[in-house]
């Protein structure tokens, strides 16, 4: 089952004195690129968080955010009263202002507010870790849902490519007859006696040059292989990308050999479908 690299998961925890919001967002990327935002007090846990994300999300540009809102009396920030009072005293010597305005100025100055860094409470962290796992589960499920939509789209487009290939196969005899007729007309226009054996040899050469039997067979096999990979248990966007490269190579060769306007129109349609597949594959894990 394929998965998309686009996803979103969020968990909100209400602890005794804090409200913790955990968010995970992901977009497509060639490799795993994790950007983590969290309060400095939790930075010691960042490596473990990154490993946990890498284990489950594997690939994509991932934004991890951990927000903390103090809802109780507990706070790590304290006003340094002595420093603030000294600032106000010095400010009064400079300007004669309202006490409230002087306080507003003083509180913005260095060391007016201090932050006490406490060790992370293990019970609190256990709750946060459970919240992170829940957010990861949500984003994985989101990716699977997106993957199911992509799979349906790929299946339809491969079916369209197969229909176009069948049309190519059906018109190929007419194309070869057309090539033969053009060659015979070209020889007739020369109005010179032509060695029949030599003409047959040249005719066979040109018909073989325009022959697309191998390309038709290989393209059909590649389409089967794409569907097989699409229905496998693993999500492998890179593998599907390699298969589309092979599909494109056969379509291009058919186009260059066709020398037949109706078939070239079909080739253009096939290229259009393939480009849409390639574009969507950028989102597949």
Image (cartoon, rainbow, N blue to C red):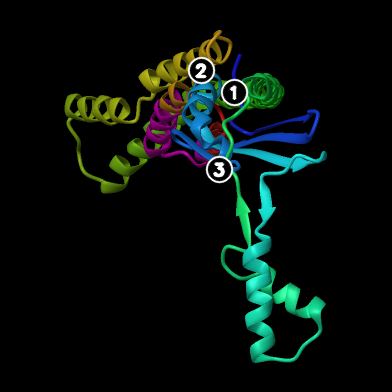
- Mark 2 or mark 1: which is in front? 2
Give SS at disc 1: helix
Q: Is residue 151 visible?
A: no
First in sequence: mark 2 vs mark 3:
3
**Which label number is shown at residue 40?**
3
- On the image, the x and y values in percent for residue 190 come to 26, 47
- On the image, the x and y values in percent for residue 170 come to 55, 21
Highlighted range, magenta: 243-267
* Alpha-carbon span between mark 3 and mark 1: 50 Å
Considering depth in this image, is 27 or 158 the residue closer to the camera? Answer: 27
> How would you rate the neighbour count of disc 1 (Cα within 10 Å): few for under 14, some for 14-19, many for 20 or more?
some
Determine if the magenta segment contains residue 44: no
Considering depth in this image, is 190 or 53 the residue closer to the camera? Answer: 53
Kindly indicate the quadrant of the structure image that contains residue 14: top right
Please report contact status of discs 2 and 1: CB closer than 8 Å, yes or no: yes
* Alpha-carbon span between mark 2 and mark 1: 8 Å
Say which residue appears at 24% left-offset and 25% top-offset: 200
Q: Is residue 86 visible?
A: yes
Give SS at disc 2: helix
- On the image, the x and y values in percent for residue 45 come to 52, 29
Residue 200 in the figure: left or right of residue 280: left
**Which label number is shown at residue 226?**
2
């Amino acid at each position: 089952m394929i998965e998309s690299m686009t996803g979103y998961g969020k968990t909100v925890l209400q602890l005794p004195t804090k409200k913790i919001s955990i968010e995970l967002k992901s977009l497509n990327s060639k490799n795993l690129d994790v950007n983590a935002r969290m309060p400095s007090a939790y930075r010691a846990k960042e490596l473990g968080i990154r490993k946990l994300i890498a284990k489950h999300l594997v690939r994509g540009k991932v934004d991890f955010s951990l927000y903390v809102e103090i809802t109780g009396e507990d706070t790590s920030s304290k006003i340094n009263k002595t420093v603030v009072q000294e600032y106000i005293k010095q400010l009064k010597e400079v300007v004669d202002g309202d006490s409230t305005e002087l306080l507003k100025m003083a509180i913005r100055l260095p060391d007016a507010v201090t932050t006490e860094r406490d060790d992370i409470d293990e019970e609190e962290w256990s709750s946060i870790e459970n919240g992170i796992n829940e957010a990861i589960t949500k984003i994985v499920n989101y990716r699977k849902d997106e993957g199911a939509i992509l799979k349906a789209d790929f299946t339809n487009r491969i079916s369209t490519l197969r229909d176009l290939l069948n049309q190519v196969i059906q018109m190929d005899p007419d194309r070869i007859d057309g090539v033969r007729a053009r060659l015979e007309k070209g020889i007739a226009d020369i109005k010179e006696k032509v060695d029949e054996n030599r003409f047959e040899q040249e005719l066979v050469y040109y018909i073989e040059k325009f022959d697309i039997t191998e390309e038709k067979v290989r393209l059909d096999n590649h389409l089967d292989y794409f569907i097989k990979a699409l229905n496998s248990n693993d999500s492998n966007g890179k593998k599907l990308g390699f298969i589309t490269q092979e599909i494109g190579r056969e379509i291009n060769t058919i186009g260059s050999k066709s020398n037949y306007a109706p078939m070239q129109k079909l080739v253009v349609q096939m290229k259009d479908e393939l480009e849409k597949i390639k574009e969507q594959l950028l989102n597949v894990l």
